[in-house]
Image (tube, grey):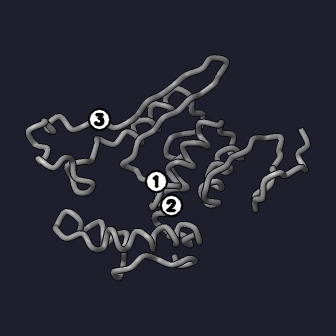
Amino acid sequence: MDLAYYPYPSRRHVVLGRRGAVATSQPLAALSGMEMLLKGGNAVDAAIAMAAALTVVEPTSNGIGGDLFAMVWDGRLHGLNASGKSPLCLTPERIPEGGMPERGWLPVTVPGAVSGWRALHERFGRLPFPEVLAPAIRYAEEGFPVGPETARAWRRAEEIYLSLKGPEFQAFQEVFFPGGRAPGAGEV
């Protein structure tokens, strides 16, 4: 394989290393994974750290209320499906005649991501769980500069989510659209 040959245009290039590699759509999240590797963690520690960080630094694509699917190789292949289930009280009679709405509480599944992180960590993790979550917590508490791609996606989401009315949307709008608008690139 010729690592210097790039047949497709891209701003990203091959990265090589001897102690592991990480990759995400957001550099701060990738840094979280690298931080775990440098502390002696393994690939599972790095993956959980990056997934948790992405829920903070790229909220337009990831969320703590999402699902998790994983495959881990430790000499054997292990799979995990931590997808959310429908709430127990969601019976067919509760679904409106026109079908399931796109937004609101009714279409929300029980989140599986965090339970998946925990299950993966308990079986394969090396570092203490609080240490694996520390970068995400740090970004949430101290803030982070919004990346350009995330800012674009956030701005596109404004017209969808700011137009929603009702008390069930108010807290979401206050958290994710402070001052009634999406944060711009570089804003903390």
Label 2 sits on a secondary structure element that is loop
Mark sitting earlier along the chain (3/1)? 1
Disc assigned to residue 62: 1
Which residue is denoted by mark 3 in the rendering?
85
Location of the N terminus (image quadrant): top right
Residue at (41% x, 33% y) in the render: 82
Label 3 sits on a secondary structure element that is loop
* Above or below: residue 70 compared with residue 78: below
Asked if residue 97 lies left or right of residue 62, the reply is left
Report the amino acid beneath label 1.
Asn
Residue in the foreground of this view, choosing between 137 and 28: 28
Residue 56 can be seen in this image: yes
Q: Residue 146 in the image: state x and y as whole percent.
A: 54, 71
Residue at (51% x, 78% y) in the render: 184
Q: CA distance from mark 2 to mark 1?
A: 6 Å
Label 1 sits on a secondary structure element that is loop
Q: Residue 168 in the image: state x and y as whole percent.
A: 19, 62
Instruction: Please tell me how crowded label 1 is: few (under 14), some (14-19), or many (20+) other residues with Cα within 10 Å.
Output: some
Q: Residue 64 in the image: state x and y as whole percent.
A: 40, 50
Asked if residue 141 lies left or right of residue 91, the reply is right
Report the amino acid beneath label 2.
Glu
Q: CA distance from mark 3 to mark 2?
A: 24 Å
Which residue is denoted by mark 2 in the rendering?
58
Residue pushed farthest left? 93
Residue 131 can be seen in this image: no
Instruction: Please tell me how crowded label 2 is: few (under 14), some (14-19), or many (20+) other residues with Cα within 10 Å.
Output: many
Report the amino acid beneath label 3.
Lys
Mark sitting earlier along the chain (3/2)? 2
Residue at (67% x, 49% y) in the render: 23
Residue at (53% x, 53% y) in the render: 134
